[in-house]
Image (cartoon, rainbow, N blue to C red):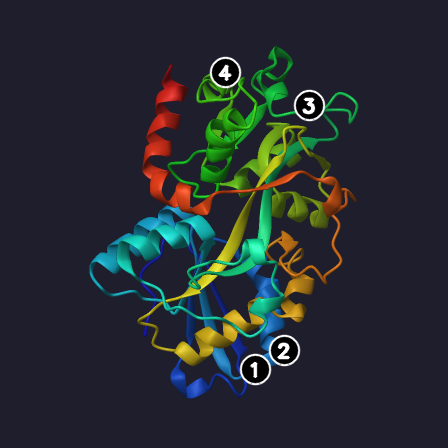
């Protein structure tokens, strides 16, 4: 089996993997991933320690581009990968539209926090990625940094903020849901689609990926970013001059997941990957791999700025709602930004 031509933003990562559960004669394990290659590398290395005999090939694209690729392949009934890495909402949407994935309960799934498990048994949770505010510490003092999502609409932050564009980012759908659905339904009447109109008036800059926003924030070109934890963790690992703010209204948390295609050419290797993802070994390196919080309670973890998980108001996103309303949310966002 060969990978499709993922040219835009595509990276091929090759490594040797595999043990008892997966044999080299089954061919390479093909993974489509919305997680950047620098995030996947640590997972591949950990998997390599346990599965040294199977070649793994990973092709990376930004989330919305990857979804477009998958839509084309699934409509043709010709998926070109064994496993996909996307957020839980996107996998749920593809499962509902195409029945594309095999149900699989990996070894160790019972140890995963119940609230994070997919009730359909299709997507396997890897980690929790939350939204926060990232800021450049050379440009903004900690005492002056915004402390809430609403603070970003203040005139003092005009032309200093970057956020992801839902036309290219799948993850930003979680933030759109949080601002326009969750907050208004939970007593925060100041939030709705007009919030994005206010950001537009304040000169927010839309980018194709959270990685680009991370780099703009680190360089000081856009010293404030509506950002995912994974990129805040990457900046911390790199030693970038950035820090994080946990907004007072809370932080929406999406589940970064993997799923196995029903038509996988290498199901044993695919199952081995999913077993590994929820293992303590994989979960222990998840902050350095995908850059987000482990799904196993037994793994000690603090956020890059030293904040404890217990001190952060993480709001689990409604993945089912997002899966059903992704296109409508994108259209509503575009309308709000054009007002």
Residue of label 2: 49
Gap in angstroms between the C-alphas marked 3 and 4: 16 Å
Q: What element carries label 3?
A: loop
Q: What element carries label 1?
A: loop
Gap in angstroms between the C-alphas marked 3 and 1: 47 Å
Residue of label 3: 146
Mark 2 is surrounded, within 10 Å at the Cα level, by few (under 14), some (14 to 19) or many (20 or more) other residues, namely few
Gap in angstroms between the C-alphas marked 4 and 1: 52 Å
Mark 4 is surrounded, within 10 Å at the Cα level, by few (under 14), some (14 to 19) or many (20 or more) other residues, namely some
Image height of 301 relative to 307, above or below: below
Q: In this view, does 287 lie to the left or right of 103?
A: right
- In the rendered image, residue 307, in percent from the top left (x then y), is placed at 77, 42
- In the rendered image, residue 314, in percent from the top left (x then y), is placed at 63, 41
Q: Residue at x 39, y 20 (%)?
A: 336
- Of the two numbered discs 4 and 1 on the same chain, state the one appearing first in sequence: 1
Q: Which mark is residue 52?
A: 1
Q: Residue at x 43, y 33 (%)?
A: 165
Q: Which residue is drawn at 42% across and 63% down?
A: 122
The reply to whether residue 163 is in sight is: yes
Q: Is mark 4 on a helix, strand or loop?
A: helix
Residue of label 4: 198
Q: In this view, does 292 lie to the left or right of 191?
A: right
- Of the two numbered discs 3 and 1 on the same chain, state the one appearing first in sequence: 1
Question: Viewer-nearest of labels 4 and 2?
Answer: 4
Image height of 3 relative to 183, above or below: below
């Amino acid at each position: 089996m060969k990978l499709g031509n993922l040219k835009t933003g595509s990276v091929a990562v090759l490594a040797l993997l595999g043990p008892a559960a997966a044999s080299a004669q089954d061919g390479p394990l093909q993974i489509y991933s919305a997680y950047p290659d620098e995030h996947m590398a640590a997972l591949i290395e950990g998997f390599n320690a346990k599965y040294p005999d199977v070649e793994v090939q990973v092709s990376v694209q930004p989330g919305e581009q990857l979804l477009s690729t998958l839509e084309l392949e699934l409509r043709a009934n010709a998926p070109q990968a064994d496993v996909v890495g996307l957020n839980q909402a996107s996998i749920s949407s593809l499962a509902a539209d195409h029945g594309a994935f095999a149900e699989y309960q990996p070894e160790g799934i019972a140890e995963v926090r119940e609230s994070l498990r997919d009730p359909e048994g299709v997507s396997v949770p890897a980690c929790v990625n939350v939204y926060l505010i990232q800021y450049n510490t050379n440009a903004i003092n900690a005492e002056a940094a915004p402390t809430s999502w609403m603070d970003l609409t203040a005139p003092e932050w005009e032309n200093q903020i970057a956020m992801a564009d839902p036309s290219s980012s799948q993850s930003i759908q979680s933030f759109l849901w949080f601002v326009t659905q969750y907050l208004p339904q939970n007593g925060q009447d100041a939030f709705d689609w007009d919030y994005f109109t206010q950001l537009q008036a304040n000169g927010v800059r839309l980018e194709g990926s959270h990685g680009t926003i991370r780099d703009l924030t680190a360089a000081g070109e856009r010293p404030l970013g509506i950002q995912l934890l994974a990129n805040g963790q990457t900046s911390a690992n790199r030693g970038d001059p950035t820090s994080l703010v946990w907004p007072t209204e809370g932080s929406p948390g999406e589940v970064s997941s993997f799923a196995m295609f029903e038509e996988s050419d290498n199901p044993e290797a695919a199952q081995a990957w999913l077993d590994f993802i929820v293992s303590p070994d994989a979960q222990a390196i998840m902050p350095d791999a995908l850059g987000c919080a482990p799904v196993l309670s037994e793994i000690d973890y603090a956020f890059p700025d030293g904040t404890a998980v217990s001190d952060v108001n993480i709001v689990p996103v409604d993945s089912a709602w997002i899966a059903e309303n992704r296109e409508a949310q994108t259209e509503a966002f575009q309308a709000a930004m054009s007002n």
